[in-house]
């Protein structure tokens, strides 16, 4: 683990993104964003408040840094692990397919909720607005 290779002083000076690269290199496999951030935070000895403050920054840094890539479902790996053709067309197609499936699931859930709302207003025509205004 990275904590065994580096002193506390070295870990403190190391950026979160560099540390993430070392963690992924040691695991030699992709990690979820949550697991990767938690390992970085643990090595950097962040407090809970620091974790909350730095979470978005870490995510932005991962997106911007050219050494990392998402392989779908918020799972991250080192770009050098994947051939160029896999990092473009194939992963984009898989990501789009996954996004479409998630959107369909959300749409299905929304339709169920809408039906409940419609039942709630079924008797809307029976309401006596004159009586409501008098009250």
Image: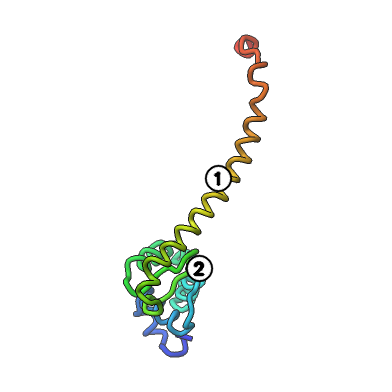
Q: CA distance from mark 1 to mark 2?
A: 26 Å
Q: Nearer the viewer, residue 25 or 115?
A: 115
Describe the element under mark 2 as helix, strand or loop: helix
Q: Nearer the viewer, mark 1 or mark 2?
A: 1
Above or below 70: residue 101: above
Q: Which class describes the residues within 10 Å of circle 2: few (<14), some (14-19), or many (20+)? A: some
Where is mark 1, residue-wise? 107
Q: Which class describes the residues within 10 Å of circle 1: few (<14), some (14-19), or many (20+)? A: few
Picture residue at 42% right of the left edge, 84% below the top: 8
Image marks 1 and 2: residues in contact by CB distance under 8 Å? no
Q: Residue furthest bottom?
A: 5
The type of colouring in the image is rainbow
Above or below 30: residue 73: above
Where is mark 2, residue-wise? 34
Q: Nearer the viewer, residue 67 or 20?
A: 67
Above or below 100: residue 23: below
Picture residue at 49% right of the left edge, 74% below the top: 31
Task: Please give left or right for residue 61 compared with residue 47 in the image.
Answer: left
Describe the element under mark 1 as helix, strand or loop: helix
Task: Please give left or right for residue 118 compared with residue 95 in the image.
Answer: right
Q: Residue 24: name its quadrant.
A: bottom left
Count of marks overlaid on the render: 2
Picture residue at 50% right of the left edge, 68% below the top: 34
Residue 54 image offset from top left, x and y in percent:
41, 65
Picture residue at 38% right of the left edge, 65% below the top: 89
Residue 59 image offset from top left, x and y in percent:
40, 65
Above or below 91: residue 123: above
């Amino acid at each position: 683990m990275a904590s065994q290779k580096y002193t506390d002083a070295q870990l403190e000076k190391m950026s979160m993104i560099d540390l993430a690269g070392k963690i992924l290199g040691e695991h030699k496999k992709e990690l979820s964003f949550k697991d990767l951030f938690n390992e970085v935070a643990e090595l950097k000895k962040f407090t809970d408040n620091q974790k909350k403050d730095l979470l978005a920054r870490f995510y932005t840094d991962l997106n911007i840094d050219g050494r990392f890539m998402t392989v779908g479902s918020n799972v991250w790996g080192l770009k050098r692990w994947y051939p160029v053709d896999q990092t473009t067309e194939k992963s984009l197609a898989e990501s789009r397919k996954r996004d479409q499936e998630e959107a369909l699931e959300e749409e299905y859930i929304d339709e169920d909720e809408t039906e409940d709302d419609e039942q709630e207003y079924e008797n809307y025509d029976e309401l006596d607005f004159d009586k409501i205004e008098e009250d």
